[in-house]
Amino acid sequence: MQWETVIGLEVHVQLATRSKIFSGASTAFGAEPNTQACAVDLGLPGVLPVLNEQAVAMAVQFGLAVHADIAEVSVFDRKNYFYPDLPKGYQTSQMYHPIVGPGEVEITLEDGSTKRIRIHHAHLEEDAGKSLHEDFHGMTGIDLNRAGTPLLEIVSEPDMRNAKEAAAYLKAIHSIVTYLGISDGNMAEGSMRCDVNVSVRPKGQEAFGTRAEIKNVNSFRFVERAIAFEVERQIELIEDGGSVVQETRLFDPDRDETRSMRTKEEANDYRYFPCPDLLPVVLDQAYLDHLRGQLPELPADKRERFQSELGLSAYDANVISASRDMAEFFEAVHSECGDAKQAANWVQGELSGALNRESLSIANSPISARQLGELISRVLDDTINGKAAKEVFQALWNGQGESADEVIDAKGLKQVTDTGAIEAMIDQVIADSPAQVAQYRDSEPEKRGKMIGYFVGQVMKASRGTANPQQVNGLLKEKLDALL
Ligand code: ADP
Ligand code: MG
């Protein structure tokens, strides 16, 4: 039997407001426990919530970025349940009239192909506090700093068909929210978490299978691993004559498996009802137009432009446009050197490699876009060769010089293109290598091309790496062949 996987994601994005969604308490990460929860966040009697306009603006910007319908009127509801980290006894959310209606996101897969994933809706809600189990023996600590932090929950349609598509979708959402600046997107700090809904069905069958929901997966890699495990579990279960039950499961990254948390029967009855303390949110066209005018160029548009205007491959355009910082760095390098392909190669190759090795983000790159652009220009105008360019890059990275030109001068890396000088070096190498010359002469003609590498290496060494390698190659071949 052939199986098909069906996946839908619910992504929680922490919005980058300075204060909470219904109070003035700070949302800063990492403060001492329980120093940033005020009376409103604690739900003390007699307090009233006031909606943070910035959270509304951010939700709308997301909606506009995914071409969604924005609700003229949206309403906050109370989702009632008991849990120690939820001091009010309910979470304020949007159940029936979410602020963002249906939209869509384009994802790019590894082979450069694209696919549209529909968004069912996105709604605003508040986060709960955090239970701390590790520092307390036989007790649980509660930190309410996070209570009331604004979240945008983005619910997809079940449009993904494998783990790679799910990861690509999550990356696309991550790109959009960070481009918009509505979230820092920091998954390690919990700024983006997702619930992964997974089911399987026989290939060709239209009806969906029963799904399991894997809660709180917080990295791109874990999303893929949780899906891989869950798909296998469900297929085995069905093939052994069992059936999947609708339930909530938890992914355990240490054991690489999902475990049941609660089944449908144990699910809460949330008794949703409209929050009597908050007015419906009414948005007019002028407000939407105003926010639309503030949208930056979005990742999908950049990707498209990098391909059509700058001639980058689908792969390069996708990798570079995924992060706004990287895209802007690339654009600055390109405007300095004028060669998009070279700029893309250096940003993704030498620069990304060096940043990864030192765990630096591109925003903290020790080498500036301007410096890198100048360095590439010196390769393009033949001032230096590729090998010397890497040396200049390293020097600039280490702060040994202000500009490529300064490093080239200081280290004497200027490429030797003077034919006479190169010929002299070649003659010397040939004179010093009688055995290799004899070997060259006695070789089959088709093997000589390979043997020439030895001579090129010697000449490059003699020039301390500064000879132009193409010239060395051409001249060497002429001179050696003249000896045949
Ligand atoms: P609920 O209201 O019970 O939370 P929803 O219909 O809102 O369920 O769906 C929640 C998420 O689960 C959505 O992202 C949706 O795409 C996904 N989903 C729904 N049905 C399936 C299915 N059979 N297989 C995989 N994902 C599904
Ligand atoms: Mg749901």
Image: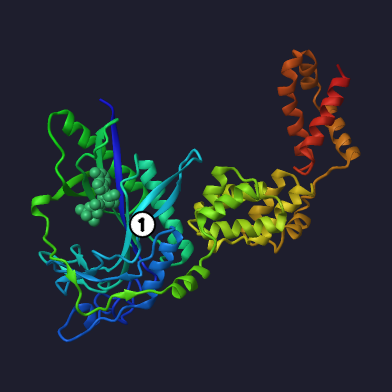
Residue 254 appears in view: no
Q: Is residue 33 above or below residue 236?
A: below
Residue 455 appears in view: yes
Residue 101 lies in quadrant: bottom left
Residue 407 lies in quadrant: bottom right
Q: Quadrant of the C terminus?
A: top right
Name the element at disc 1: loop
Judged from this view, the residue extending furthest toward the left is: 265
**Image coordinates for residue 219, horizontal then vertical, percent:** 35, 52
Q: Nearest the camera: 60 or 324?
A: 60
Q: Is residue 183 above or below residue 31?
A: above
Position of 180 with respect to 455 (left or right) is left
Q: How is the image coloured?
A: rainbow
Q: Quadrant of ligand 2?
A: bottom left
The type of residue carrying mark 1 is Pro
**Image coordinates for residue 177, horizontal then vertical, percent:** 43, 61
Residue located beneath label 1 in the image: 102
**Image coordinates for residue 415, horizontal then vertical, percent:** 80, 46
Say which residue appears at 72% left-offset and 28% top-offset.
Answer: 453
Say which residue appears at 32% left-offset and 47% top-offset.
Answer: 223
Q: Quadrant of the N terminus?
A: top left
